[in-house]
Image (cartoon, rainbow, N blue to C red):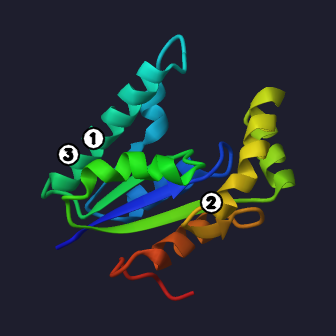
């Protein structure tokens, strides 16, 4: 059995956590890593040292999950808005046979602004997320526009992207 590494990326507020929570429930046996968990530090300080530590921790966890015979599906979500971030994370894992699925969740600027405001994000956070939104369209990933889709429909579209994925109920 070849492991399936499913990477869900997109700007903050697009629905990555919601989608991965449901994917984790639907895909078995699976494990889920949210890249933000590796950044939970107080105070939150972005330095070169901290960036290297987070990248190393993510790669270490993904390697352990992918090497563990208990899991067929490894879900990973994060805000990877440049192709080189994928390379940083995936290069150390090249010796592990995997089926890789890379999906960018995108949405309209209006939908993103509304979701982030509803979540209580600051105007600075919203502006940064809106600036990064356009970067996701140029990535080498499948794109799913979440603007007007309920989470269940986004999950169904992700599941259809997974080779030999689980059977889906008829629509």
Would residue 163 be seen by someone viewing this image from the given angle?
yes
Q: Where is residue 126 in the image (x, y as percent from the top left)?
A: 78, 36
Secondary structure type for disc 2: strand
Q: In this view, does 103 lie to the left or right of 7?
A: right
Q: Count residues near mark 3 (Cα–Cα under 10 Å), then give few for <14, some for 14-19, many for 20+.
A: few
What label does residue 64 carry, if any? 3
- Quadrant assignment, res 150: bottom right
Q: Is residue 65 left or right of residue 146?
A: left
Whole-angstrom CA distance, mark 2 to mark 3, is: 26 Å
Q: Count residues near mark 1 (Cα–Cα under 10 Å), then give few for <14, some for 14-19, many for 20+.
A: few
> Which residue is identified by label 1?
61
Identify which residue, 143 or 86, lies in the foreground. Answer: 86
Residue 58 vs 143, above or below: the answer is: above
Residue extending farthest to the left is: 69
Q: Position of residue 11 (x, y in %)?
A: 65, 47
Q: Where is residue 61 in the image (x, y as percent from the top left)?
A: 27, 41
At x 19%, y 58%, the residue is 95
Earlier sequence position, callout 1 versus callout 2: 1
Looking at the image, how many numbered discs can be counted on the residues?
3
Which quarter of the rendered picture does the C terminus lie within? bottom right
Would residue 122 be seen by someone viewing this image from the given angle?
no
- Quadrant assignment, res 143: bottom right
Residue 94 vs 65, above or below: the answer is: below
Secondary structure type for disc 3: helix
Looking at the image, do the residues carrying marks 3 and 1 touch, with CB atoms under 8 Å apart? yes
> Which residue is identified by label 2?
105
Secondary structure type for disc 1: helix
Looking at the image, do the residues carrying marks 2 and 3 touch, with CB atoms under 8 Å apart? no
At x 44%, y 32%, the residue is 37
Which quarter of the rendered picture does the N terminus lie within? bottom left
Q: In this view, does 119 lie to the left or right of 82?
A: right
Q: Count residues near mark 2 (Cα–Cα under 10 Å), then give few for <14, some for 14-19, many for 20+.
A: many
């Amino acid at each position: 059995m070849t492991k399936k590494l499913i990477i869900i990326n997109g700007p903050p507020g697009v629905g990555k956590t919601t989608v991965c929570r449901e994917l984790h429930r639907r895909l078995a046996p699976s494990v889920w890593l949210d890249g933000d968990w590796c950044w939970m530090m107080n105070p939150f300080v972005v330095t070169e040292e901290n960036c290297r530590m987070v990248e190393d921790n993510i790669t270490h966890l993904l390697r352990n999950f992918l090497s563990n015979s208990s899991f067929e599906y490894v879900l990973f979500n994060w805000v990877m808005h440049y192709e080189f971030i994928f390379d940083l994370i995936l290069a150390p894992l090249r010796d592990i046979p995997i089926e890789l699925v890379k999906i960018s969740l995108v949405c309209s600027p209006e939908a993103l602004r509304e979701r982030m405001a509803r979540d209580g994000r600051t105007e600075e956070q919203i502006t940064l997320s809106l600036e990064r939104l356009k970067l996701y369209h140029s990535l080498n990933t499948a794109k799913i526009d979440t603007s007007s889709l309920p989470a269940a429909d986004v999950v169904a579209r992700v599941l259809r992207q997974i080779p030999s994925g689980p059977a889906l109920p008829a629509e």
